[in-house]
Image: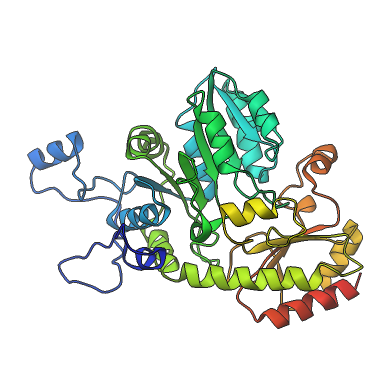
């Protein structure tokens, strides 16, 4: 499958069939596996083969299909699936770090990612330095000869900053640091993060991979050595395993992901273009617009602006008026869904941040994050315009 297109890999990659030769992937909903003899059990615990399994916390045939398929799609050697996107972020970082290690991270991150870096890692003696991820001079000044890892969102949540993966990776690799990229907003459809220099890519499969708001999931992708010798020992003992049923949902999601994401991206561009001149909005942020400060980098790195845009209504009161007037777009805190979702980051996903930190990150009281779904674009534009009229 390696020489096939992404669409073909997303449909057929990693398929395992039982003796019944089923068309749709089987759900192996079991916590354990049976051995013919005590000697066979001993042998498997000593060294399990590629198609041998011990316990669902360690691996499962349905989960393995998902891991192999997403690895083929991303161009990675291997993958380990987790119970959620945050389990993947935590697993990728914690599995490789110990007290005294140094990490450099972009400061524009999802609130839970910030918690792991600010609270969890530092609690156990990891030294973390935060930088403006869009400024290469900041990376260059912060990366030290002893830096163990760098971490960033390739497109930041919720202000949609684009970070130059190749440039940051070159700086990190010059001191032997591992580059870990949270690639959720970029999506597997537009991502070439590994080809551009990332060592490890993390996804919340809850978002575009499932794409229909059904289940939590995450995945860590990288070299086989990193996944099997660093990530797997940590995650199989700490218990962040993806359930077989959720893995099956993710497999089904991958089959239609490219069609969904490309349609959502086209709608997002049309919506951003339609609303950019709205006088009641102080900002429309979308990497696909020429007005976006990182537009050229977005086009070079991704080739598209993605499925998410941000609107600034000027104040929290105005943002709430807009949100409460919406009839098609729903208010929630997920993204990448078939349904269009509006979120007020300052009071939800990033509410724990001090106001000064929100200001630095551009998370203003009037900012609304809009994840564009699969509804008719004209219906979404009409719904947003009548919401804006309520300001």
Quarter occupied by residue 315: bottom right
375 to the left or right of 318: left
Residue 87 x %, y %: 50, 44
Residue 289 or 89: which is nearer the viewer? 289
Residue 30 x %, y %: 29, 56
339 to the left or right of 79: right
Q: Is residue 180 visible?
A: yes
Q: Is residue 162 above or below residue 15?
A: above
| Quadrant in which the N terminus appears | bottom left
Residue 389 or 140: which is nearer the viewer? 140
251 to the left or right of 280: left
**Residue at coordinates 54% horizontally, 41% vertically from top-left?**
166
What is the total number of numbered labels drawn onto the structure image?
0
Q: Is residue 201 above or below residue 23?
A: above
| Quadrant in which the C terminus appears | bottom right
**Residue at coordinates 35% horizontally, 63% vertically from top-left?**
9
**Residue at coordinates 87% horizontally, 68% vertically from top-left?**
321
**What colour scheme was applied to this rendering of the protein?**
rainbow
Quarter occupied by residue 13: bottom left
Residue 7 x %, y %: 40, 67
Q: Is residue 369 visible?
A: no
Q: Is residue 132 above or below residue 145?
A: below
Residue 85 x %, y %: 52, 49
Residue 342 or 58: which is nearer the viewer? 342
């Amino acid at each position: 499958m390696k020489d096939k297109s992404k669409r073909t890999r997303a449909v057929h990659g990693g398929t395992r069939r039982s003796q019944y030769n089923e068309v749709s992937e089987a759900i192996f909903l079991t916590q354990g596996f049976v051995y013919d003899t005590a000697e066979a059990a001993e042998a498997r615990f000593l060294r399990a083969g590629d198609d041998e399994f011990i316990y669902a916390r360690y691996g499962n045939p349905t989960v393995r299909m998902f891991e192999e398929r997403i690895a083929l799609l991303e161009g990675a050697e291997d993958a380990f699936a987790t119970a959620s996107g945050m389990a993947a972020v935590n697993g990728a970082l914690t599995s490789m770090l110990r007290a005294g290690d140094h990490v450099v991270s972009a400061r524009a991150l999802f609130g839970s990612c910030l918690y792991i870096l600010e609270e969890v890692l530092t609690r156990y003696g990891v030294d973390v330095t935060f930088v403006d991820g869009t400024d290469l001079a900041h990376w260059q000044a912060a990366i030290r000869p002893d830096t163990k890892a760098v971490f960033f969102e390739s497109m930041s949540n919720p202000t949609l900053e684009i970070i130059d993966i190749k440039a940051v990776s070159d700086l990190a690799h010059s001191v032997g640091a591992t580059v870990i990229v949270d690639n959720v907003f970029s999506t597997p459809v537009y991502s070439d993060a590994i080809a551009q220099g990332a060592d490890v890519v993390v996804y919340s499969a809850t978002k575009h991979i499932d794409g229909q708001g059904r289940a939590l999931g995450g995945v860590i992708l990288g070299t086989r050595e990193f996944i099997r010798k660093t990530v797997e020992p940590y995650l199989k003992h700490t218990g962040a395993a993806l359930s077989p049923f959720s893995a099956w949902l993710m497999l089904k999601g991958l089959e239609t992901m490219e069609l969904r994401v490309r349609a959502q991206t086209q709608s997002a561009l049309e919506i951003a273009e339609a609303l950019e001149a709205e006088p009641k909005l102080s900002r429309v942020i979308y990497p696909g617009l020429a007005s976006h400060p990182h537009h050229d980098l977005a086009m070079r790195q991704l080739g598209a602006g993605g499925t998410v845009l941000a609107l600034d209504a000027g104040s929290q009161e105005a943002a709430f008026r807009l949100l409460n007037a919406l009839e098609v777009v729903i208010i929630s805190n997920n993204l990448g869904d078939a349904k269009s979702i509006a979120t007020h980051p300052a009071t939800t996903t990033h509410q724990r941040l001090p106001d000064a930190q929100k200001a630095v990150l551009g998370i203003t009281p009037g900012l609304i994050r809009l994840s564009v779904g699969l509804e008719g674009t004209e219906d979404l534009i009409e719904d947003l315009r009548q919401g804006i009229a309520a300001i």
